[in-house]
Amino acid sequence: MAKKSFTLMVIPDHDAPVKRYTIQRSWLVQVGMGLMLVAGLGAGASIHYLQVAADASENRILREENLTLRSQLKSVRERIEHIGSTLDRVERFDQKLRAVTLLSDPQRNLAMGPTEPETGTTAPTTDTQFTQLTTTETPKVLLGRLDRLSAEATRQELSLQDLQAYFQDQKSLLASTPSVWPARGWVTSDFGQRLDPYTADRVTHAGLDIAAPHGKEVTAPSDGTVVFAGLEGGYGNVLVIDHGYGIKTRYGHLSKILVKAGDRVKRGVPVAAVGNTGRSTGPHLHYEVRVNGVPQNPRKFILEE
């Protein structure tokens, strides 16, 4: 049978008696189990400590990242607010411009001018009203707002392109409108009915007769292209400039012509000189403005005094 106890003998160095100690096996087992338990607890505590330390380090990193993300989200919200407010101002300005230019925008139900809301209703708000942003909005909500902002920005870009094309066309129209005197002098015969100086018959005078010294400069009243330069019956030397948009100007009785057919001319550029060619009673310029071939009173186009 297995021994139930052990004897521990202690032998001194000198003549002291030998000491004997009896140790029960069960006690040794208990001590061994106790030591093993302590070692296990120590190992478990060490592992737990290492895990807690790792978690603490990770939590610190996550807290820092969370603070960074909150800061970034705040910045994104502020930028969305700013962009939304800017788009709101652009849209209001767009509506004003369309009201002034009498343009409409069917896509956004913009009429030619501002309208009052019906009684009991409020004016509709646009998709770009982002002044209600809160700090509780999720990234998904912010992405939705950004998508709407992007769509609204695209609509605004197309709308402004329409306005740009309109104003570009208006700029071209203004540059092509004969708005200044082609020559300075005395208007001896106005547009409309008059007595023919040769026959004394009442006839329609299709332009203005501007008396001026022989050889005085005649300048282009607006941008255009020379379409005719040569002799034309009783008008003598004649110059015709096409300004686009159906507008043409004619100059008669010229002493000389400084341009030729096909030349592009700018407002204020000399194109001819006052003369007395053709059927004329003295040096003067016969000046006509025709719109789609119909003579118009040149005074309606002249803006300067």
Image (cartoon, grey):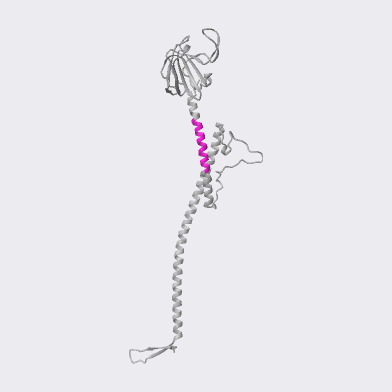
Query: At x 45% / y 76%, what residue is drawn?
Result: 38
> Is residue 68 found left or right of 193 in the rendered image?
left
Q: Is residue 143 visible?
A: yes
Is residue 87 positioned above or below 31 on the image?
above
> Is residue 116 found left or right of 51 in the rendered image?
right
Q: Residue furthest left?
A: 14
Specify the quadrant of the image occupied by residue 239.
top left
> Is residue 98 found left or right of 1 in the rendered image?
right
Residue 90 at x, y percent in the picture: 52, 39
Query: At x 57% / y 39%, what residue is drawn?
Result: 108
Task: Look at the image and give the residue range highlighted in magenta.
Answer: 151-168
Is residue 60 positioned above or below 256 on the image?
below
Query: At x 52% / y 41%, what residue is drawn?
Result: 87
Residue 113 at x, y percent in the picture: 59, 34
Query: For residue 293: magenta?
Result: no
Q: Main secondary structure of the magenta part?
A: helix
Specify the quadrant of the image occupied by residue 107.
top right
Specify the quadrant of the image occupied by residue 229.
top left
In this view, the residue in front, 134 or 146, is: 146
Q: Residue furthest top?
A: 199
Query: For residue 154: magenta?
Result: yes
Is residue 113 positioned above or below 233 on the image?
below
Is residue 277 positioned above or below 74 on the image?
above
Residue 272 at x, y percent in the picture: 43, 17
Quarter containing the N terminus: bottom left
In this view, the residue in front, 100 or 166, is: 166
Q: Is residue 221 visible?
A: no
